[in-house]
Amino acid sequence: MISNALLYLTRKNLIETDARIIEPYCQGWRGERGKALFLARPRSMDELSEIVRTCIRNDIHLIPQSARTGLVGASVPDDSGQQGIVSLERLTSRFEFDRVNRSVTCSAGLRLSEVNARLKPDGLYLPIDLGADPCIGGMIATNTGGARLIRHGDMRRHVLELSVILGDADGTMVKLGSPLRKNATGPDWKHLFVGTGATFGIIGECTLSVERLPVHRAAALVPLPDETILPDFLIRLEEQFGSLISAIEFMSANAMHAAYAHVPSLKRPFGHDIPEMAVLVELSCDWPLAAEDRSLDDILLSGLCALWDETSGKLGAGVFGRAEEIWGIRHTLSEGVRRRGRLYAFDLAFRRSDTLRFRSVMTARLNRQFPGIEVCDFGHVGDGGLHFNLVDHLPADEWTPDRERAIRDFVIRAAVEEFGGSFSAEHSIGPVNQHYLNTFADDFHKSLASALEPVTSGRSFGRVHYSGINQR
């Protein structure tokens, strides 16, 4: 059955079986590796439908793949060599821009950079700020947030309509939603496919609401002497600057050191005396300022000076500079940390008041429980997101996989059970988080997944499933 299916897809020129072509698609961003039965790169929704239909009828498990920028291994096949990869990289032909509706309809394989390059001449963009350059379909499937979520929200907020291929025996294509921003005629089914990986289907096309590009930006880095100051600082920032705030980002000293080690030419606003923790504050506006208006730099400077006075010196002395240079540091953190050593990366979310409290408690515990661990964290404290990255400096001859699992369990159990947090803020599930989904999902959510399985693609593709549910 499988051999006949592969022969059929090969004759239709829909798959590649050459191992040399397939191999690069079997590796993830963080070095995960697997083996694939074949590689499919459809150029149209019809081709995608035919690939899915043929594979479902022949019980071939599919791994949908966008730009392979995910960090939880969700787009990498396992090592059985029996799964097929469906890459969307050639699904790029559609791009229809509606200036009046301020929306764009596009293929899922287009990259974020390409979409924004095409929108820029009209002063618009998709305002999801990321260190990587993912495909639009993958961004929707993982409900990507990014550094400016506090102003613009996540991908869910921007999705108006989806065209999806279900994992049924017919490879059914469905359209969900519409280009309308207001439509209260029933359940908004498209949200089943936002943030759920490929559990319920493969996204092939979408219509997105886009925003006006910022005309003016101002940024500053503010040192925090300790984590207890953050909750009140967040409140005062929002009282002082209101909707002008577009980002509030946290960076630890260890993460900044890693960034400078990776790119020595980066601007050093603090010189070589890097504070233990700092917060990046950005203001932006998407309208032209009149000659008599105050500049955003002036508003930011005077507002932060007022906050320094109010806190009686509790805040460190902030530094100002070109927004691009300050963001250059923030955008280098991830790659810098990745190159620092053996990395255990956590994508956590908390109530804003608990974000830095968690990192303080957990840092102390890790120092006692697991010597050799260096915390190189950063994150989106404006929305409660924390990239709690741990670099393990234990000598290679002493390291075992059991140590990594013990550390992961130790951190995530505390985040979820003690702090009421999420073990996946915006990276989705994948093999890295599968165990924790099975552990922490309650019976009600498992029953919902079980009820949805007969009418979705749960048994066909994707890496998101509960124990005993949505498995092949």
Image: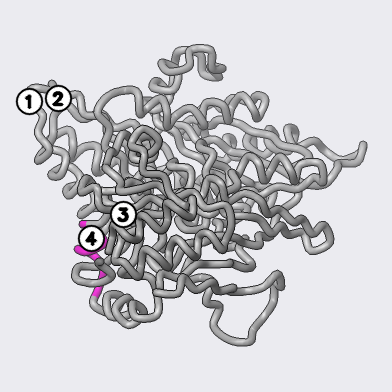
Depth check, front residue: 339 or 311:
339
Which quarter of the image is occupied by the C terminus? bottom left
Tag 2 and tag 1, C-beta contact below 8 Å: yes
Q: Using the numbered discs, state the Cα–Cα distance from disc 3 to disc 1 in whole angstroms.
A: 28 Å
Q: Callout 2: helix, strand or loop?
A: loop
Q: Which labelled disc corresponds to residue 398?
A: 1
Q: Which residues are magenta?
A: 435-442
Comparing labels 1 and 4, the label whose residue is closer to the camera: 1
Q: Callout 3: helix, strand or loop?
A: loop
Residue 216, image x, y percentages: 76, 38
Q: Can residue 39 be seen here?
A: yes
Q: Which residue lies under the disc numbered 4?
A: 417
Image quadrant in which you'd find residue 23: top left
User: Of the residues under marks 4 and 2, which one precedes in the sequence?
Assistant: 2
User: Of the residues under marks 3 and 4, which one precedes in the sequence?
Assistant: 4
Residue at screen point 53% across, 12% down:
265
Depth check, front residue: 331 or 180:
180
Mark 2: amino acid:
Leu
Q: Which residue lies under the disc numbered 3?
A: 423
Comparing labels 4 and 2, the label whose residue is closer to the camera: 2
Mark 1: amino acid:
Glu
Q: Using the numbered discs, state the Cα–Cα distance from disc 1 to disc 4 in whole angstroms.
A: 30 Å
